[in-house]
Each structure stands twice: as structure tokens, then as C-alpha cells.
Image (tube, helix red, strand yellow):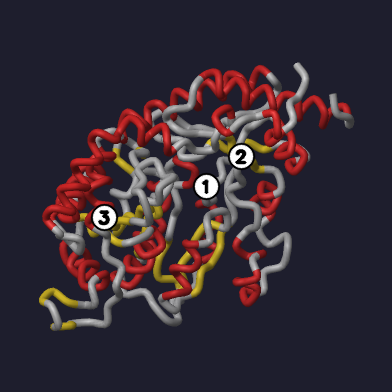
Amino acid sequence: MNSSKPSQWTQREIVPFVDLRAQYAVLREEIAPAVEAVFKQAAFILGPDVAAFESEFADFIGVSHGVGVDSGTAALKVALEALGIGAGDEVIIPANTYIACAFAVSQVGATPVLVDMRDDYLIDADLIEEAITPRTKALMPVHLYGQAVDMQVILEIARRRHLKVIEDASQAHGARYRGRPCGSYGDVGCFSLYPGKNLGAYGDAGIVVTNDAAIADRLKLLRDFGQRKKYEHLIIGDNCRLDTVQAAILRVKLRHLGRWNSQRLSAAKMYDARLEGIGLTPPPRRNDEGHVYHLYVVQVPERDRAIERFAAAGVQTGIHYPIPIHRQPAYSGLNLPAGSYPRTEQAAEKILSLPMFPEITEAQIDRVVHALQEHLSEARTGSPR
């Protein structure tokens, strides 16, 4: 089959990286009345849908409390503050993760300490102990790409070293570890509800979950100017409340999350079988229960050329993440040279995220894999077909 030029593909024919339009087409009749109800009530700030969503999401995760905020980054930040982490403290995070983890730590005055990844892209728990210092106050494992970190090891280290655990489950809505949802193991669990997530709002949103009533109370103070009663400010707080309209939308979408996650797993299995057929290793998966495939990440040679091949075939792709945290200009002050985290750095040069969303069709997956096969053939022979 001859490759097609980008101009030959219409917008309708493109295989999108994430297809939120397809999702909305299915949900439109449910979402419209939910949003209209908020407008009729004019309860736009901390309205009834916020409390309802917080309770429903906490039940979904299997914990006692949920506190809605306006982004995943805000969720991490207020979680750190609620646990008393601040200036002079250190928090251990993965080297391979989105920079919001590091930003949240920095924003409370603490220092992020990075730990390299394993071959499944998750934090290497065997390297955590050597990163701990007298200033370490917390561990922040990240359930990256939709797969659960080995929380038993994390929790044992935390117990032995008297550390707090902040789970970043922003890519793991509904992912499970040993029968329990991600986000239910740590002192707190933090979720981004960005539109492209497995459970996403129609704008920025986030939530923190916990089993500790005192932590939940402090989180509510921190997100709303430090007040329980208007104009009575008990602590120095922030303004990062979950919008009521977004909460109403999220309540609708939460009812579909289990089905969507099952569809993602089915799509991942189709990808797995086809990648093995063309000689490319699928992303590691420890078990079917644990992974919800927020992203489907492979490693390919000559990635820039691969991206061009996909674009020519009308396939959108992404990279999560092309520049590790310690190589970002924002963190030049950490003085961590190239080679500090070799697995993370090596992966950053090759990883490529393929289209993944619940509504993706078998025909779309076949188009993605065909384009990938074309690229691999070119990379092996050193010339285009």
C-alpha cells in the first residue's frame, strides 16, 4: 500500500489521538439536562453537584472523603499542604512523570527528589531508599499511563521511614492494585480530571480523596480561602474550588467510566496482538485488572521520522514525555546532568503514544499499526518504501 500525503486526508478521516467529539455525541442527551439544572439553580460555586460528585467519586475509589478542586496540579498542591509539607522538606517523585508533580512540590516550598523508572515506566521502588534523606517527608508514586505502582513496597518503605504517601492517580481512574482502586492506598489520592483523562471534565478539574476526616476538612479549607463560614478565614488558603458545572458533567461521565475502561483494555489487547505480529514489543502489563490504558505507549526507532509517517497516514500521536523533569530549564537549579536517570532519559528519546480512547475502532487500530509497520520497514532498510 502506498503512503498517503497529509493533504489527501480529510479531518473526518484522521485517526485522532483522543476523540472527545465521539464521546460527547453519545453523552449529549445526559449532559444537557445536568448542566441546565445548574443554570436554573444558579449554584455555580460549590453547588449541590460538587458535594454529590465528591461523594460518588469517593465511593468509586472506595474511600470516605472526596474534595473537588480546579485541576490535578491543585489537587497535588493542596494535598501536600494538608499533610504539612513545606519549606525545607523533600518529596520523592518519579523522574518519568509529568512536570506538574514537581511543580506542586516546588509550589509549597519543598524540593522534588527524582527516582528513575523501571522497564514498565513506573518508579523503581528499589531505588527509593537511597534517595531518602533526613529532609524527606513524603513519597509521591505516580500510576503512570494507567498502570498501578507496586503500592505494597511503597507503603512498607513509608511505614518504616515514617513518611506520608501521596498517590498521583491522574492517569489511573479506575485502575486497581490487588483488588483495590488506585488512590485508596495513600494518605491521600490525587486525580486530574482534565478533558482527555479517562474521567475528564469539559475544562480543568481535579479531586483529592482520603479516608482521614481531619485531612479532608483541611483540604476544604485550603481550596476555599481558608474558610468554613464566609469572611471568617481560619488559615491561609487558596481559591481552587471545583466548578459546579464541571461537577455536574463529571457525575454523568462517572457512570460510564467502568465501561470506557473496559473498552480501553480491549483496544490495548488488539494493539498488543498486532504489534507482536510486526515484531514490536507491546507496553508491559502486569495484569489485566490493574491497567486502564490512559495512554498506549511504545518505543520506536527514529521517532521523529515515525511521527512524520503517522502524520502522512492521517494518524495523530503524542509523546509522554519528551523532556525529563531534570532536563527542563525550570529545574536547572537541581544541577542534575544528563545521565542522572538513564532509563528515563533513554525512554524519552523513543517513546511514542498511539491513539487510545474508548471509541477507537478496530479499523482505526489497523491504520495505526499499518503506518507503524511502514515506518519500521523504512527504519530497518534505511530508505522509504
Residue depicted at x 22% and y 47%: 35
Numbered badge on residue 209: 3
Specify few, some or many for label 2: CA neighbours under 10 Å numbering under 14, 14-19, or 20 or more: many
The quarter in which the C terminus is drawn is top right
Counting residues from the N terminus, which is met first, the one under dot 1 or under dot 3? Answer: 1
Counting residues from the N terminus, which is met first, the one under dot 1 or under dot 2? Answer: 1
**Location of residue 230 by image quarter:** bottom left
Q: CA distance from mark 1 to mark 3?
A: 22 Å
Vertically, is 32 above or below 78? above
Q: CA distance from mark 1 to mark 2?
A: 21 Å
Horizontally, residue 127 falls left or right of residue 227, namely right
Residue depicted at x 33% and y 72%: 81
Front-most of residues 114 and 241: 241
Disc number lying in front (2 or 3):
2
Q: Is residue 116 visible?
A: yes
Front-most of residues 365 and 61: 365
Horizontally, residue 200 falls left or right of residue 48, namely right
Q: Marks 1 and 2: CB-CB under 8 Å?
A: no
Q: What residue did someone put label 2 on?
A: 317
Disc number lying in front (1 or 2):
2
Please, what secondary structure does the residue beneath circle 1 have?
A: loop
Front-most of residues 67 and 80: 67
Please, what secondary structure does the residue beneath circle 2 have?
A: loop
Numbered badge on residue 122: 1
Residue depicted at x 23% and y 36%: 30
Disc number lying in front (1 or 3):
3
The amino acid sitting under disc 2 is Thr
Residue depicted at x 64% and y 40%: 352
Horizontally, residue 292 falls left or right of residue 285, namely left
Give the x, y percent position of residue 313: 68, 29
**Location of residue 331 by image quarter:** bottom right
